[in-house]
Image (cartoon, rainbow, N blue to C red):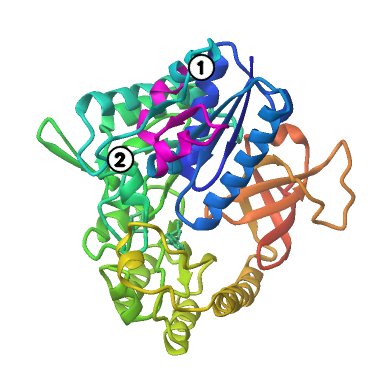
Amino acid sequence: MKLYIVSFGCQMNKLDTSLVEAEFTKSGFELTEDQTEADVILMNTCSVREHAEQRVLSRLGYAKHLKRSGRKVVVGVIGCMAQRLGNSLLEREEVDVVCGPGQIPELKKMVIEKLEGSKGGVINVSPQIRKSPSVKNSAMLDEFELENSPNLTEHKNKAFVRVMRGCNNFCSYCIVPFVRGPEVSRSPDKILNQIRRLAESGVKQVTLLGQTVNSYRHTENGNEYRLHNLLEKTAEIDGIEWISFVTNYPYMDYTTPLFKAVAEIDKVCPYLHLPAQSGSEKVLKAMNRKYTPQDYIRLIDEAREHVPEIAVAGDFIVGFPGESEEDFRETEKLVERIRYKNIFAFKYSPRPGTSTEKRLEDNVPDKIKRERNIKLLALQESISSEDNKKFEGRKMRVFVEGRSSKGHLNNADNEKSPQLIGRTAGDYIVVFNGQEELTGKFADIIIEKTSALTLFGKVSDGQE
Ligand code: 5AD
Ligand code: SF4
């Protein structure tokens, strides 16, 4: 039996996809990258912007064509779109299985039922997603995660570990709280056991994942654990050398202990992904974000007091309803002030059922959204190319991810010493020639040249 699985969206989805791959391969499925030979096609979907959903719908169109041309294949939609659209997806002739993110442990059973010829579609999504998930459901998800996570192989020796699910923030544009449910923090014991197992299987770098990972909070035996406690405990695990955490919300409380942890625990990477979304106080308010641009700046300044070279990444939404030229100018000013390592910029996309979609007209024309998006990214690019120059001549440690997919350097890609790609602890991308056996290991690279997105260098021979 062959499984083809494609993943859209965030790190959470990629993690779920790897867990599903691990579980299916354990039961004898083989993974394929060719849809036309698959017995099962699964799409792990994202609902955060309309564009992501459209891509899935066009993929489903292709699956329909495959089926109509006589291919016997079970087609499943999993993830956020499955939770959001539920039965209406099942009504499509090509869709056999619909499974929400909270029901993933039951996916294999559902698919096998269909492969064995059961009639009609199968659906399993959370009926009342905003109600706290049952203890049984959480336990099932924990177990599923623990059982399947050592097999993650997207990057050798690097793993993602979910520390919490869901989100309680209700930013007014965001669909996540409606499809992923309320915040639930996993027990530190379970998380640490999972990381211990990963370390035993060779994992050296872990990224702790949560929609708002800095709101992690779990009480066990009367002790409250927050993210910094988890970072401390993770750092005690032999074999784990780098620890990162994504993504964060600019909460104004609980900053000092976290920044202190980044400063004081060697293994914790100096990297902070902290979405600002806008630099305009008015827009932030309309977004139901609970901080002002000044609060945000204060937060980054504090982070930099603790960890001067911390690499800061951010997300922005442009063209939010009512965003004026002046508001956008405020966003540009914030980007200039913060000097991010990199940013992600998105055009506002109305999501059905969110409070912005219900209350505010999507009144910034697409052309302007596009212009602002391009302008913001260009501004960041000029900042990054300037700031990256400081790395020239420096020796930087990278975790090697493998062969680089495209040629970046002038030096030829050759078999003995192909172009490899690695990332520093601050998440800077480094391209260099080296032996492929370095994949999954650390290497010291002397940086020779830099651009806005990439640092280029050579493997240090230890003399420098
Ligand atoms: N439209 C555009 N971008 C969005 N994001 C979340 N919801 C929307 C939306 N409705 C962006 C935010 C978030 C990132 C994951 O996606 O910037 O940080
Ligand atoms: Fe969405 Fe806001 Fe939660 Fe992030 S913090 S997942 S943007 S609601």
The image quarter containing residue 358 is: bottom left
Residue at mark 1? 114
Query: Which element type, helix, strand or loop, lies under badge 2?
Result: helix
State the image coordinates of residue 377 (x, y, percent, origin top left). Answer: 59, 72
Neighbour tally class for label 1: few under 14, some 14-19, many 20 plus, Cα within 10 Å: many
Residue designated by label 2: 230
Q: Nearer the viewer, mark 2 or mark 1?
A: 1
**What amino acid is found at the position of numbered circle 2 in the picture?**
Leu
Q: Is residue 388 left or right of residue 135?
A: right
One can see residue 95 in this view: yes
Residue 243's place in the image compared with 453, above or below, is above
Quarter holding ligand 1: bottom left
Q: Secondary structure at mark 1?
A: helix
Q: Is residue 242 shown to the viewer in this render? A: no
Asked if the stretch drawn in magenta spans residue 244, the answer is no
Q: CA distance from mark 2 to mark 1?
A: 41 Å
Instruction: Decide if residue 380 is on the left or right side of residue 124.
Output: right
387 or 88: nearer the eye? 88
> Mark 1 or mark 2, which is nearer the start of the sequence?
1
Give the quadrant of the N terminus.
top right
For the point 69% across and 51% down, which residue is it? Answer: 445
Q: Could you tell me residue 80's position as x and y percent?
A: 42, 43
